[in-house]
Amino acid sequence: NAETVEISARETEAGRRAYELDRAHVFHSWSAQATLQPMTVLRAEGSYVWDGEGRKLLDFSSQLVNTNIGHQHPKVVAAIQEQAGKLCTIAPQHVNDARSEAARLVAELAPGDLNRVFFTNGGADAVEHAIRMARLHTGRKKVFAAYRSYHGGTHLAVNVTGDPRRVPNDFGDSGVVHFMPAYPYRSYFGSTTEAEETERALRHLEDMIVLEGPQNIAALILESVPGTAGIYVPPAGYLEGVRELTRKYGIVYIADEVMAGFGRTGKWFAIEHFGVVPDLITFAKGVNSGYVPLGGVVISEAIYQTFAERAYPGGLTYSGHPLACAAAVATIEAMREEGIVEHAAWLGENVIGPGLREIAQRHPSVGEVRGLGAFWAIELVKNRETREPMAAYGGSSPEMNELVAALKAAGMLPFANFNRIHVVPPLNTSEADVRRGLEIIDKALEITDRYVA
Ligand code: PLP
């Protein structure tokens, strides 16, 4: 229980030593190594983490939007311990009860006839394998992917990514074609209504498909609600239209649910909000709240049939790792027993959504708030008319740095990206803690308001 945690002087001392060793030996993701100042985490419990000085912070980031059931959930910790006592590892070619049950549960939750699961170690390799399956299934090579998206850090996953991280990794060898997705607040198509945005974005996509040659296009990959790139919920009709186009041209539709899946939006999979059934779903993160690395691809019957008699040429030593799968089974069961997905939907409708809309009215630096469930973004601007962002896409700014520092000083661990603060607490965060977090944000936004022109 987060109320009773006490951090001893010995723990903070150990934290200092860990920091020194980290700076001496750990090479961090996406960072300039020498100038980085990472935060030490000594402990975590529920919706809270304790930093290197033993300060308690409200986790409004769910780490990388993955600890959907919060930290140290006792049922999941117990399931990992029990599995560790029984069987820590087993090669992927053998049958294992934790893996079988995890696959059954994921198949049960997935829509339509997506009933087979290929397990990976995380989201990026799920994306790699989904694309490989699509290419082998269709005999085609090209992959359509959206700008303003994130699909992972490995070779092909970062190449289908449509954010600034792709650029230094783009060696031009992957057959990837990027298109502009629907994004009403910053419409590339000059749309003024959602209906117009849907219609124009779909026309643009179809034009691009025709110009690139449908006979060459294996897959289209799209986050059902793009996460890292801004939690911009697709306008009505957009995903339905994408599904129609992929059907029309025989293209495999890969719904990337790595971030939006497993309850984040208030439904098990975000695509359920739109009534669309894709051909493949990639998942990771929330499947077991990241307690042990796990991801995977959920596969339709048609694509399964391609590999029914012919070998699938791909695999991983840790595919369906028993500790990770035991954690997934316990996570999904706990989410069902405790109504955690329903709670996320309730928070979105009754607390986060209304709370953020009120905040938007009070603060001129808020350009837009948007989201579903426990998956919301506050887009900050210097000018509401021109929508000039508080930090450029792909960049930082002193204004945003000041805001983030103030949120931390007030006791929050925020998720900030460019000109946005994402409100992405664990799905089972209490109403009181969510309200407290919103109050912290409300107060801190006085900082960005000062820079509004
Ligand atoms: N796809 C989406 C939509 C993601 O948000 C992420 C990670 O943030 C990934 C894929 C990559 O997952 P991982 O970091 O587990 O490889």
Image (cartoon, rainbow, N blue to C red):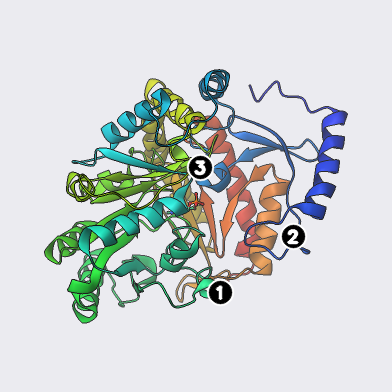
Label 2 CB sits under 8 Å from any ligand 1 atom: no
Q: Residue 13's spot in the image, x, y percent?
A: 87, 36
Comparing 133 with 70, the one in front is: 133
Cβ–Cβ under 8 Å for marks 2 and 1? no
Look at the numbered disc 1 and give the secondary structure of its residue. Answer: helix
* Residue tagged 1: 168
Q: Nearer the viewer, residue 414 or 356?
A: 414
| Mark 1 burial class by Cα count in 10 Å: few <14, some 14-19, many 20+ | few
Mark found first going from the N terminus, 2 or 3? 2
Residue type at numbered disc 3: Asn
Residue annotated with mark 2: 36
Amino acid type of the residue that numbered disc 1 sits on in the rendered structure? Pro
Q: Nearer the viewer, mark 3 or mark 1?
A: 1
Residue at (52% x, 60% y) in the render: 153
Which image quadrant for residue 352?
top left
Ligand 1 closer than 8 Å to label 3 CB: yes
Q: Using residue 241 as the reference point, say whether residue 326 is left or right of it.
A: right
Q: CA distance from mark 3 to mark 1?
A: 26 Å
Question: Which numbered disc, 2 or 1, marks the residue closer to the eye?
Answer: 1
Secondary structure of the residue carrying numbered label 2: loop
Q: Give how far across and how far down residue 250 sits, in percent.
A: 16, 63
Q: Circle 3: is it few (<14), some (14-19), or many (20+) Cα within 10 Å?
A: many
Location of residue 272 in the rendering, given as x and y in whole percent from the top left corner:
26, 44
Q: Which residue is mark 3?
A: 66
- The quadrant the C terminus occupies is bottom right
Q: Secondary structure at mark 3?
A: loop
